[in-house]
Image (spheres, rainbow, N blue to C red):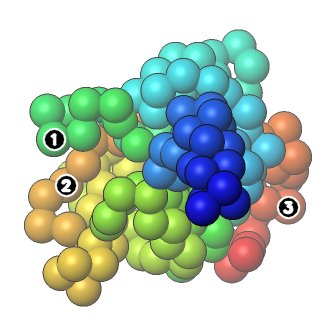
Amino acid sequence: MVATFLALVSFAALPTAAHARLQCVTYARQISDVQITGNARDWWSNAEGRYERGEEPKAGAVLAFSGTRAMPYGHVAVVRKIVDDRHILIDHANWSRPGMVERGVVAVDVSAAGDWSEVRVWYAPTKSVGLRASPAKGFIYPHTVTAKAESGKAQS
C-alpha cells in the first residue's frame, strides 16, 4: 500500500509535459536538425533568418503546414525520402491519432502549381491519403542539407 501511494505521488509530481502526448513539434525537433520553438503554425516565420526555406522537398527538411480551422496549431513533419516530384515519405507525430508517431508515410503535393502549398497526408484510420488537402507554407532546410541533397531525389 505504501509503495502504491509513493508511486502515485511520484507520478503526480512529474511535470505536466511528462504526462502530455507527443506533439509534432517536439518530435520534429527530436529527429531533425531544425531546432525551432513555438507552435507548428509559427515555424515558417520563426525560421526566417535562421534557416533557408523553399518549395522543394529535400531529405531532412521540415514541411511546415499552416494553421487552419481543423488544425489551429498547424503541423510539422520531417521529410524522410523523395519519391518523385509530387510524392514524399515523411516522419511525424500526432496526425492520425493523438501522440501517434508515423514513419515513412506518404505525403502528396496536390497543389495546382506543384509548389507543395496543398498537401494530402496518409491518414491511418482510413488507410489512405486524407480526403482534405492541408495548406502548407513550404520546407525548412536544416543547415546540414547540402548540394548533394538538392540533386539526389532518392535520399533517405
The amino acid type found where label 3 is placed reads Lys
Residue at image position (78%, 60%) is: 149
Helix, strand, or loop for circle 1?
A: loop
Which is more N-terminal, label 2 or label 3? 2
Please indicate whether residue 120 sits to the left or right of residue 8 in the image: left
In this rendering, the answer to whether 56 lies above or below 37 is below
Give the distance between the C-alpha atoms of the residues marked 1 and 3, in whole angstroms: 37 Å
Q: Quadrant of residue 80?
A: bottom right
Q: Are marks 2 and 1 in contact (CB under 8 Å)?
A: no
Q: Does any portion of residue 79 appear in the rendered image?
A: no
Quarter the N terminus occupies: bottom right
The amino acid type found where label 2 is placed reads Ala
In the picture of the structure, the residue carrying the numbered disc 1 is 70
In this rendering, the answer to whether 27 lies above or below 106 is above
Residue at image position (74%, 19%) is: 50
Q: Residues within 10 Å of mark 1 (few under 14, many from 20)?
A: few
Which is more N-terminal, label 1 or label 2? 1
Residue 148 tag number:
3
In the picture of the structure, the residue carrying the numbered disc 2 is 133
Q: Are marks 1 and 3 in contact (CB under 8 Å)?
A: no
Kindly report which numbered mark, 1 or 3, lies closer to the viewer in this rendering.
Answer: 1
Give the distance between the C-alpha atoms of the residues marked 2 and 1, in whole angstroms: 11 Å
Q: Name the spot of residue 95 as percent of width and height, x first.
A: 35, 59
Q: Name the spot of residue 92 as percent of width and height, x first.
A: 52, 60
Give the distance between the C-alpha atoms of the residues marked 3 and 2, in whole angstroms: 30 Å
Which is more N-terminal, label 3 or label 1? 1
